[in-house]
Amino acid sequence: MAFKTTRRVAGGVAGSALLALGAATAAGGAAAAQPQIADADPSSTTHVVNDREVLAHWIDVDDASVRLANVEGSFSFNQEGTTPNDELFNVFGTALTSMCSKPAVELADAEGGVANFYVNVGGNVKKTFTVDVRDLAEDKSQETTMACSCATGMPFGQATVMGVPLSAVVEMADLEDGVNTVTAYGADGFGQPLPLRYALEKNALLVYQVNGEELSSTADSSLQLWMPETVARYFTRNVVDIELTKEAEEPELQTVDPCYRNKVNIMNYADGCVFKAGDEITFEGVADDMGSPITAVEFSFDNGATWTSCATEGATADKWVNWQFTTSFEEAGDYRMTVRAKTADGEVSPLAATLVFEVA
């Protein structure tokens, strides 16, 4: 028996986190893994991200829930799945905040819009020019699936996108010496400068198709800038201009807030769900960390005293880990499940997710 789950891939209700934080000094195919018992962590842990030291410590939850150590179960994961376009487009934002703000009505309601994939290229180039990205599509198009997350929030979108690499446009430009910065400007004036080398290394795409649907807009360009393992602030909609410039210093790259590294989410919701003792229950959710692959998802049913660790061997950093954990309980009562993830660089989720449910 499984919980009710939300409709979208990344949806769900993540319960209140059991970790308090504060700054101190500053999809491949399905895979299965045999759960292992993880050592209990100390009462607090410290990690450093971007020269900021973050302290995370357990809050002792004093409740009457049943506490079970080292719960066994079956585990599987994959990195498949996409967010429906109507939900994905509703998180595209406005100037200054890119994809992390209010709905972009021109995208959500663009059924009668026009597909326009022209972009102007200028800056420190010897000659400015305009290119229709569709002219490059036949030889240069790439399709990939990637996730998108804000710097200070949970993952909110994963899509299969089709586009032309930004590098194909850069190669057309006769650059002046010392060009080190690229800025994609949307029709609304939004633009966020990026180190050119970073955008090329991450294979930034000028996207014209999302989840098999060609983009359209009520006005201006329909192009969107996407790149893997990068915060959503740099994902720009309606790209009309690309500026290649030489700056005294490369722009500083915004990364995910330390409190939102290695995010984990639970898709189940338990409203009205009561399970019988011995029922097989399937929990499911999403784990995501921009820049470092998820190596394990861990589960605790005793408020963090012990953890069942499930490896996610082969997971990559550009897509979510969609996990499932199935187990059963013989004793009636209220239960609290806590979930965290670990990454290849040793990060433990600063914010764990919890879910409370009842076994009758």
Image (cartoon, grey):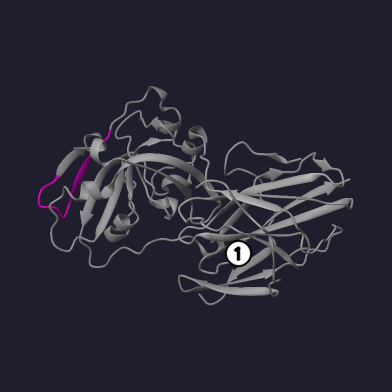
Q: Position of residue 198 (x, y in %)?
A: 32, 59
Q: Position of residue 343 (x, y in %)?
A: 54, 64
* Residue ranking furthest to the left: 126
Q: Nearer the viewer, residue 60 or 308?
A: 308
Q: Nearer the viewer, residue 49 or 169?
A: 169
The answer to whether residue 5 is above or below residue 312 is: above
Tag 1, which secondary structure? loop
Question: Relative to 281, is 64 on the left or the right?
Answer: right
Residue at x-position 56% and y-position 61%: 295
Q: Is residue 92 visible?
A: no
Is residue 316 rendered magenta in the image? no
Residue 164 sits in which quadrant?
Answer: top left
Q: Position of residue 128 (x, y in %)?
A: 13, 46
The answer to whether residue 337 is above or below residue 115 is: below
Is disc 1 surrounded by few (<14), some (14 to 19) or many (20+) residues within 10 Å? many
The residue at which mark 1 appears reads as 350
Magenta residue span:
117-128
Is residue 123 rendered magenta in the image? yes
Q: Position of residue 71 (x, y in %)?
A: 77, 59
Question: Relative to 307, is 274 on the left or the right?
Answer: right
* Residue ranking furthest to the bottom: 25
Question: Relative to 109, is 244 on the left or the right?
Answer: left
Residue at x-position 23% and y-position 61%: 180
Q: Is residue 282 visible?
A: yes
Quarter of the picture containing the N terminus is top right
Residue at x-position 61% and y-position 36%: 7
Task: Give the residue type that dot 1 points to.
Answer: Pro
Residue 341 sits in which quadrant?
Answer: bottom right
Quarter of the picture containing the C terminus is top right
